[in-house]
Image (cartoon, rainbow, N blue to C red):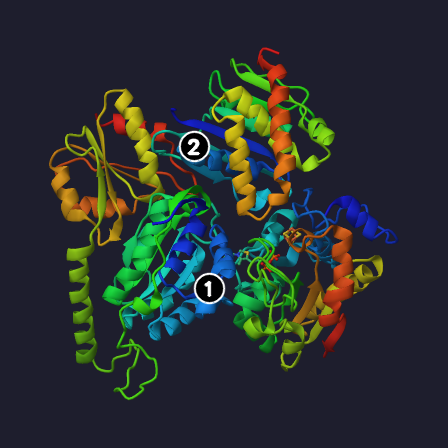
Amino acid sequence: MDQYSTIVSGFGGQGVILTGKIIARTGMEEGLEVTWLPSYGPEMRGGTANCTAIISSKLIGSPVVKEPSSLIAFNKPSLDKFGPSVQQDGVIVLNSSLIDDFSLDKSHKVVLLPVNELAKDLGNQKVINMVALGGWSKATGKLSLSALKKGMKLTLEESGKERFVDINQKALEKGYETAKEGIKASSV
Amino acid sequence: MGEKKLMRGNEAIAEAAIRAGCRNYFAYPITPQAELLQWMAEHMPEKENGTFLQAESEIGAISMVYGAASTGERTMTSSSSPGISLKQEGISYLAGSELPAVIVNIMRGGPGVGNIQPAQADYFQATKGGGHGDYRLIVLAPSTVPEAAELTFEAFNLADEYRNPVILLADGMIGQMMEPVELPSPVDTSDLQPKPWATTGTDGRDSNTIRSFAMGAEALKSINRDLQGKYENIKKAETRYEEIGVDDPDVLLVAFGTVARIARTTRRLAEEQGINLGIFRPITLWPFPGDRLAELSKKVDTVLTVEMNAGQMVEDVRLSVNSEINTPFYGEQGGVVPDPGRILQEVKKYV
Amino acid sequence: MSEEAVAENTKEMKKVFDRPESLNDQQFSYCPGCHHGVINRLIAEAIDELGIQDTTVGTAPVGCSVFLYKWFDIDVIQPAHGRVSAVATGAKRARPDLTVFAYQGDGDFASIGTNNSTHAANRGENITTFFINNTLYGMTGGEMAPTTLIGQKTTTTPQGRTAKDYGYPIKMSEMLAELDGPTYITRQAVYDPKRIDKARTAIKKAFRFQMEDEGYSLIEFLSACPINWGMDPVEANERIKKEVEEVYPLGDIIERS
Ligand SMILES: Cc1ncc(C[n+]2csc(CCOP(=O)(O)OP(=O)(O)O)c2C)c(N)n1
Ligand code: SF4
């Protein structure tokens, strides 16, 4: 696989950092080269947070990307900031619970996921990020659902959070299933 | 070598130090290396008499290093640019007293408080002697997270072997990013070479002193001569670099640390346009691999240096290569990370 | 802290809804429930009331309050971490006609800068010092400070601070009160209207001492850092009342003039 880069962006507390780590962790488990780079600094306090995860079958040069292959945007400011830079034919997973109006000009593959409502259905608001990641898996086809489940499990276990594995698995599945219906081109 | 782990640069450096037998770590918090302290706070093996101590300041921390290193124990401190400036007094004393110690600088933008974004603007400070007096530090510059772990481990060996402080010079990007790391297996600290010079209590032997003080010009001259002799040995034995595609390049690019890895992407982009971009990456910034660079420069018309500063290593590049050739410089400052495509534009000026 | 929260806390005061002249028309970027914002505002109000906006020079320490130069419409110097008391000394000695204040976090004042803070106090420098004690390092990610309480968990004391490793919470105000140099030292809090009122009086008093050439004053504030304490703003206020004040009692410590 050529280099595939993903920017995950949202408010602090939406699980942005973890989502990116799980992409990297899963990629590593699949035998790929990976990098993960957070935005860091005081602006993270209560403000927006983002990170970049790259997976590739070849050595990764720059961990910073100007034009990511895909974007997971949890809020409007994130979409405004990174949406326009996503590559032609790239994937954008949008949190449609918080983003209702948007316009993108390139031929992006856009997945609208009401992650807040979907997470609420699962009974846990914290898992919005895994719902989105499930959708990302479906839309990009870069890491399979089962691989991500495993990567997520390992990541949570390594930080002593085993007890959340089940609910996060359900969230990944939910996002994956829902995205099946919701993928459209961005001329919406 | 153990299994692969996905780690942040700061964490990988901390863990590699512990595995290298570092049992004394003193530091003061600063971004972007805060995770290094946090890792040490959690993982320093207390059962093996390990010490993690958050000092009252960087001056305190480096002086604690001076004390712990005097007892012959493997010792480390870490900080980022403004904190490293405060440590310069202690570093000069460590060098003058020939104490082994490892100092990690996760560089950020300066001067002054600057910001917390990655930069390489402390090259001069690290390689030309940031404190007073004629001294040298061994300066290691990793360009990836796994290499940061590897060089940290190696830094302790070099420090002990030469009784000299070693700086690991990385930047905020390497400190903050995660990559898969294969950690070195832990050393058994009881297997380390004994240090007969250390202040451990005489216990029957003649007494030892650790000092940089020498009364009288002749005495200090002789100490300095010995130091310079040691530095010559280090130059001969420890100069390290990496070369990529240097057989017949159109342009030779010189870069260290983060910029060198970014340049790999530039090299790929260049290839697509039929340009052969060679990369020369100094791994030891002191001793600087100038002789090898001089040889390579004979094959090209242009040696382009790229750094995240206003042009520091480029001075060593220009001192090393034939003065007939082009030695342009391209740099970004203030925490801006150069873009691979932008570097390619620079390269193309010289093809 | 948000405007509403300030307003809520200062319900009974008049003039609350006006922005002090000495503050710029800017939203603070402190976390919700952070007391830095309340303290900044009280200082600005005091500057207004004393009519010294044009002759005051402030300092913006490295720490969460580094943006003080953005919030205040006065001249501001931004010193190195820990050096605020010495920098304020320099400015005041160079221009004794100015009113100079040092604003310092507990990392700044009580750890890296202790030598500078102590000697400024001992010389009885004619400056006004605000020392914000939130029992840890806010900006760098919640590490231990010398003011951290015994047992308090921070990112560098994951098991809680122990006296064996780090000694006891440092009592800078009491320590400095032992010296002959300082004129006025007091400890204040801003978690309710009554406390805010007292703090306001103390700030004005401290500035007046400087204006009347009476020498060094220090106001220590017990300040909330909800984000690094892992609490909501209300719990954080409660923590100050129940735990922090136990170790750091409020009130005037010395007043000599
Ligand atoms: C010489 C130096 N060392 C360390 C730092 C990193 N640093 C920035 S702010 C800070 C401490 C913040 O704590 P405090 O002074 O208590 O202020 P708060 O953020 O809690 O208001 C530190 C250690 C620095 N900027 N310069
Ligand atoms: S981290 Fe703490 S001190 Fe800093 S702004 Fe937030 S609440 Fe205030």
Count neighbours of disc 1 (C-alpha within 10 A) and say few if under 14, some if 14 to 19, many if 20 or more: some
| Picture disc at residue B45 | 1
* Disc 1 to disc 2, C-alpha distance: 32 Å
Query: Mark 1 belongs to which amino acid?
Result: Pro
Residue A119: give x, y in percent of width and height: 69, 31
Q: Secondary structure at mark 2?
A: loop
* Type of amino acid at the residue the image marks with label 2: Glu
In the rendered structure, the answer to whether residue C169 lies left or right of residue A159 reads right
Q: Is residue C93 visible?
A: no
Using the rendered image, report if marks 1 and 2 lie on a common chain: no
Question: Mark 1 — on which chain does it sit?
Answer: B
> Where's residue B71, x and y in %?
35, 75
Query: Closer to us: mark 1 or mark 2?
Result: 2
Left or right, B213 with respect to A66, comes to: left
- Looking at the rendering, the quadrant in which ligand 1 lies is bottom right
Pick the front one: C101 or C167: C167
Q: Quadrant of residue C186?
A: bottom right
Residue under label 2: A30
Marker disc for residue C211: none
Q: What residue lies at 63% left-to-right and 41% top-to-bottom? A: A164
Image coordinates for residue A4, horizontal then vertical, percent = 43, 26
Coordinates of residue C126 in the picture (x, y in percent): 62, 71
Helix, strand or loop status at disc 1: loop
